[in-house]
Amino acid sequence: MKDCKPASGFTLIQVIVALAVIAILAGIAFPSYKEAVRKGKRAEGRAALYQLMLQQERFYSQRNRYIAFSPGASDEDGKRFKWYSGNSPGTSAYEIRGEACANDSIDNCVRLVATPGSARVDASFKDPLCGVLSLTSTGQKDANAPECWR
């Protein structure tokens, strides 16, 4: 007569229960992770706007005017300004441009606009809460929600 050893391993029900628990935890954690990534990229955009505003103020102190710029700038002054928020265009979350403030000329006031996830930067990045971030040389900050500048 052979010795009967108990079977080792997991039953199908145990595996299904374990997978269900993992799926529930992932379902709870993933949205929080995505929001944390979004907040980090928002901080990247705000930091880029502040840095570019400092550069604009430096330019203003030397030439008594601000300058408009965009990703496709062809003039030498416009090429001085970085038009993306991160280390390279492909990994950046925001495309940035400088334009005249509403009801004013570029000589007196500049408005920096950071657009999330355009064709020239990481197009997969979307920010439905804040949308476009902007900062003017008068200190006005704008976004879709007030918590976007905190």
Image (cartoon, helix red, strand yellow):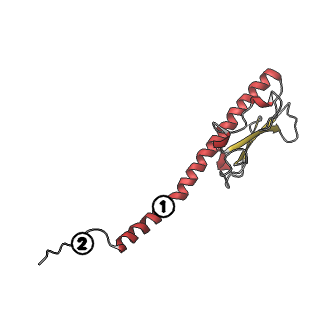
- Report whether residue 82 is seen: yes
Image-quadrant location for residue 66: top right
- Residue lying furthest top in this view? 62
**Front-most of 147 and 126?**
126
Give left or right: position of 74 versus 25: right
From this view, report whether residue 142 is shown above or below residue 67. below
Q: Are marks 2 and 1 in contact (CB under 8 Å)?
A: no
In the rendered image, the quadrant that contains the N terminus is bottom left
Question: To which residue does mark 1 refer?
Answer: 26
Which residue occupies the foreground of this view, 119 or 35? 119
Q: Is residue 90 left or right of residue 31?
A: right
Q: Which residue is at a point 77% across and 30% down the rendered structure image? A: 79
Residue type at the position of mark 2:
Ala
Where residue 91 appears, x then y in whole percent? 63, 42
Nearer to us in this view, 135 or 80: 80
User: Which residue is under mark 2?
Assistant: 7
Q: Quadrant of the C terminus?
A: top right
Q: SS class of the residue under badge 1?
A: helix
Q: Tag 2's secondary structure?
A: loop
Q: Is residue 11 left or right of residue 30?
A: left
